[in-house]
Image (tube, helix red, strand yellow):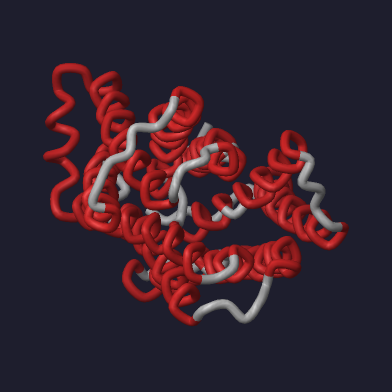
Amino acid sequence: MDNYQKGLLLTALGVLVIAPDALLLRLISLPAEQVVLWRGLLNIAGFLLIVVLRYRGQWWRAYLACGRAGIGCALLFSLSTIGFILGNHFTKAGNVLVILATAPLIAALLSRFFLQERLPLRTWLAIGGCMVGISLIVLDDLGSGSWLGSAFALIAALGLAGNFTLARSQPHIDMSPMLALSGIITAALAFGWSGTIVLPDAVNLGWLLLLCLVLLPIGFTFIQQGPQYLPSAEVSLLLLLETVFGTLLVWLFLSEHPSQQALTGGTIVLAVILLKNGWERFMDKTPERVT
């Protein structure tokens, strides 16, 4: 398996692991600020535990190796998390998801400007196709909304794209350990917002532990390693699959049936990514790689 295929596998596995995010958030009955606070606190423990298990007695060296770029990745990851949550607080979810779907385009532009990475035409076409598909998925939820919510959603997209681009600038360094720092930042901001910590009941605590201590740390550890092997636009593009898989899980377990339009949009996203990766795997023996 070459580096390109390894990057695809790591990112795809990460997306599959975090796919239940939307479903579990629906099952947690806590105020938004408390969800964010517990998400940050449990993420700290989850990401730190993964780093200790991976690096054993040398776990602290993994943090030192990340340097200033790692701190930047942590800040940008926190920015995307807070922007996404506040975006949903101030405007409709559909507006947020459509704006967030621009992350691959933003990542491509950032990589082109700062890293001089050139993407082939098929990648630009795939970005456009996925944006169309995501737009169809959430079109029913589009509305007037708040400009402030849209601004936060744009901040989330910029944070997501910036994180992957910055990680891509140091392809020989694993930036995933720094996601523990993003948990500290997220928890601190959420505590400043709420001013208190509410202890969840047993049911809500169970869902929080599953999502924030297990699934998110494992999934994003995989995804954050993606830019070591793939252009940041490719990682952002694969991350759009979470919207499709997350919608399907909510449909299956909560009987929230998506519209025919949403199903069409999800089919477009899956088809575009499968066709692109299939072409590179079987037809084009030299998919884009930047060394």
Q: Residue 112 lies in what quarter of the image? A: bottom left
> Looking at the picture, how far across and down is residue 19, in whole percent?
59, 40
Whether residue 13 sits left or right of residue 78 in the image: it is right
Q: Nearer the viewer, residue 117 or 30?
A: 30
> Looking at the picture, how far across and down is residue 51, in whole percent?
26, 28
Residue in the picture at 83% in, 58% down? 264
Query: What number of labels is visible?
Result: 0
Q: Which of 288 and 177 is in front in this view?
A: 177
Q: Residue 24 lies in what quarter of the image? A: top right
Q: Residue 48 lies in what quarter of the image? A: top left
Whether residue 166 sits left or right of residue 138 in the image: it is left
Residue in the picture at 73% in, 34% down? 253
Whether residue 59 sits left or right of residue 278 in the image: it is left
Q: In this view, does 233 lie above or below 62?
A: below
Residue in the picture at 66% in, 76% down? 143
Query: Is residue 174 at all visible to an observer of this figure?
Result: no
Q: Is residue 287 above or below residue 105?
A: above
> Looking at the picture, how far across and down is residue 206, in whole percent?
47, 24
Query: Is residue 140 at all visible to an observer of this figure?
Result: yes
> Looking at the picture, how far across and down is residue 83, in whole percent?
40, 63
Q: Is residue 103 above or below residue 14?
A: below
